[in-house]
Image: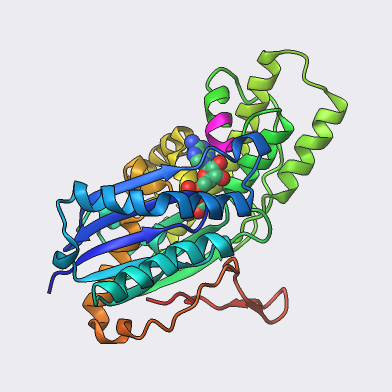
Amino acid sequence: MGYRILAIETSCDETAAAVVADRRVESNIIASQFVHQQWGGIVPELASRAHVEQIWSVVRIALDDAAATCDRLDAVACTTQPGLGGSLLVGANFAKGFALRYRLPCVPVHHLEGHLLSGFLAVPNLPLPAIVLVASGGHTLLCVLETTERYRVLGSTRDDAAGEAFDKTATLLGLAYPGGPAIECLARQGIPTVRFPRPLLDREGYEFSFSGLKTAVRRYLAEHPIENERQRADLAASVQEAIVDVLVRKTIRAATEYDVEAIVIAGGVAANARLQERMRAAATQIGASVIVPDREYVLDNAAMIGLVAHLKLELHGTDRYRRFDFVVDPTPWRMYRHGTAKNARYDAMVFSL
Ligand code: KG4
Ligand code: ZN
């Protein structure tokens, strides 16, 4: 049975709403918050306030764009975790209020499940199993997607996320927030002359670690202060190459081990053209293809939240989503490690679908 869903995403600094029907996107509206740029990073209180100011207009435009009236919706969905507490609350409470007003079920969605399944927005019949790399500002996860409801997390980051590594090193290089696009833009004019460390690259398993990169860049700058724009561009290219190298090599290793036809890259960092180019070149070598959702579905958006809600409704029906008893949970997702370092075991499936 098909559902028409109004989805809302406010976990970080984008106020987003979308209408998704039968897994197809009818509208996808994203209002980015530029207020944070002057502070060099996201200021949580400013983010929640901006969500409060924008949410109703964003929802209204999403409904208008889809020519959807409130009485022709089957459900509302919202991101409930993880993210900034205040920001999540704005979206979740708006969604609950809207759903109560129009007597609709309200589906809570894990933000990372949105990124994880966003490949279906690009290729509805994505060949499974697939390897999915989710690389965003808060998380870096490598997963094997077995069916739409079954996926295993193979590894995540021990410390900083890939996007965070871009953002923090960009600040050290004197670039504006968000650092990922700034580094990518500058790196086009440079060459990777400095070999920064690639932690855990040759280690077994699929864990990442990016915090050493910012320390290495800081140390390098202490000894070699930037004297001209050419050097800054070369450093940007060097940082980008170090991050991309690790992401590509671990992803390709997983794709080989699980013998998949398709690799999906998702989350904000997937917008990086160098990552896409190198992932495609490496995937060709192993006979796999790389799927990158359109930019509007790669960065934070509500269409991916609507898609997950649709899958949940198909799986469970609407009744369990009429209770409205869910709460928001800002805690970042972490892999829980058991056992000794030599004999480690990880909780593999921890999401909610
Ligand atoms: O998925 P996303 O929009 O929000 C989170 O869930 O975090 O990801 C934002 C992150 C930021 O760290 C940003 O610097 C990074 O994605 N990013 C990029 C690019 N565009 C955004 N990183 C590298 N290259 C890009 N072009
Ligand atoms: Zn995200």
Of residue 182 and residue 213, the one placed in the foreground of this image is 182
Q: Secondary structure of the magenta portion, mostly?
A: helix
For the N terminus, give its image quadrant: bottom left
Residue at image location 76% in from the left, 35% down from the top: 217
Q: Residue furthest right?
A: 223
> In the shown orientation, is residue 236 left or right of residue 300?
right
For the C terminus, give its image quadrant: bottom left
Residue 122 appears in the rendering: no
Residue at image location 16% in from the left, 63% down from the top: 22
- The relative height of residue 39 versus residue 254 in the rendered view (above or below) is above
Residue 277 percent across, percent down from the top left: 42, 34
- The relative height of residue 324 versus residue 210 in the rendered view (above or below) is below
Residue 174 percent across, percent down from the top left: 71, 28
Residue at image location 44% in from the left, 71% down from the top: 152
> In the shown orientation, is residue 39 left or right of residue 289?
right
Residue 317 appears in which quarter of the rendering?
bottom left
Of residue 300 and residue 245, the one placed in the foreground of this image is 300
Residue at image location 74% in from the left, 33% down from the top: 172
Magenta stretch in the rendered image: 178-182
